[in-house]
Image (tube, rainbow, N blue to C red):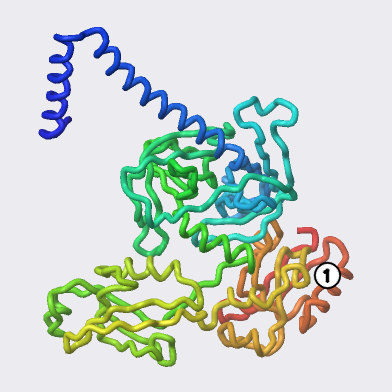
Amino acid sequence: MFDCNLRIGFVCLVFSMTLVTLGQAPRTATTASGAVVSELAGLNDELQTLAARISPSVVKIEVSGLTSVHDANSPTVSLVARESSIGSGIIVSSGGLILTNAHVVEHATSVQVTVYDHPDQPSALAGNARRFKAKILGTDVLTDIALIQIEAQNLKPLALADSDLVRVGQIGLTFGSPLGLENTVTLGVISSTQRQLSVNSPVTYLQTDASINPGNSGGPLVDIHGEVIGMNTMIETQSGGNEGVGFSIPSKTLAFVYEQLRTIGHVRRGALGISVSSISPALAAGLGLPDKPGVILEDVTPGSSADIAGLHPGDVVAAIDEKPIQEPQQLSVILFSKQVGDDVRFTLRRPDSTLSSINVRVTRRPRDPESILDSADLTEDLVNRLGIIAVPLSPEIANLIPQTRMPQGLVIVALTAGGKGATLDLQVGDVLYAMNGKPLPSLEALRDLLDHLPRNAAIAFQLERDGNLQYLAFSNSD
């Protein structure tokens, strides 16, 4: 339905065209019609040009791997089944770096990437499509982002735009391989720019009505300039297909995760040492707080960067980096994109109603198992037979994790994509103390025991998980 102003404008246009028609009907009517056709033709040409430029930078990803399933006849029994899936990816460097969703390459034992050099031609034509085997460089499950690499040069990378500049209503185009149909382009608008799907998650999404379907995951959402503003990730649907409610990871989050996956293979997140809460009417009345927006600091960890900077329990956070704060979720979303070493500017309302601005440095989270990966060598510390990356429990490592029950062992810091670790129920953070009753002071000791173990022989690990000692047993053929 038109609103009043739009109805008036429409009527005025019809009226003015009628007056002109009375004088010079054929020429003027043709000119007006021709102008509309010309504008539509111009838009059509621009979209075609944009699609032709973007499509060679969007790849099709085919994944095969193993996953655990439950036996319908015996719910307590888990089986391992082979699975295959199709997704999409964004070329972000001419040397073969590609961004996609972590869920696309989850459980992968093989990742194949197809690059389309001439997307306007049938993919069956010789020389049009090239296939590469891809290597997974790193994944971040929290944001659902993965970085993979293929051995190729002179590819056509896409630029990542600043998603903070995206506005509701602007045009967006999605690219990818929905249902395996490569080089598919859809058009829509941005429906929301800060869609938070869970109050417990700091991840926000761009929402779009551009058609997104299974297989689009990992493909780009681009603006009219051909820059990536998001990565297509999920849809809200009751039918299983597109219903006009799709979600894309903002390009600012992509850039944040990409740089860390590229340089260190994982995402290092920081901490400030604060806990906050919303201000209820009862809390405001009890503490005599003014009726103004903000969140209250419930606790400041002694010795943390926030404590050193001068933040105190009872301070009201009115703004972060000049952005007003009304709910704790807003604070978590802003801090989520901060890296270790960044400064965060707090605007505080003190109990005496004075305003203060204080910079707080983001520091590494204490006792964070992910920090161990900084010192791990993803090649030297790999135990391929088990699908794990582990490091000896040195004094330096002990300072990064909760206190252990024994002083000597191997700490699992990562599971390899597609490896046996998850199937064998090994977990990141497990500390392996002994195998078949023999201590594990080093990786060499573990590898030596595995190398001399007969096939089908039993393996029994004594390990610590969440502060508890336990045994984990399986066959060497598993």
Residue closer to the observer: 69 or 430: 430
Q: Amino acid at mark 1?
A: Leu
Q: Position of residue 453 (x, y in %)?
A: 86, 68
Residue where numbered disc 1 is placed:
450
Residue placed at 83% from the left, 70% from the top? 450
Q: Is residue 119 above or below residue 144?
A: above
Occupied quadrant, residue 14 = top left
| Coordinates of residue 50 in the picture (x, y in percent) | 50, 36
- Residue at the spot x=65%, y=68% of the render? 414
Q: Is residue 403 above or below residue 447?
A: below
- Give coordinates of residue 52: x percent, y percent: 56, 33
Q: Residue at x 50, y 78 (%)?
A: 341
Q: Is residue 204 above or below residue 33?
A: below
Q: Quadrant of the N terminus?
A: top left
Judged left or right of residue 342, residue 208 is left
Is residue 176 in view from this perspective? yes
Number of numbered discs on residues: 1
> At numbered mark 1, what does the secondary structure look like: helix, strand or loop?
helix
Does any portion of residue 73 appear in the rendered image?
Answer: no
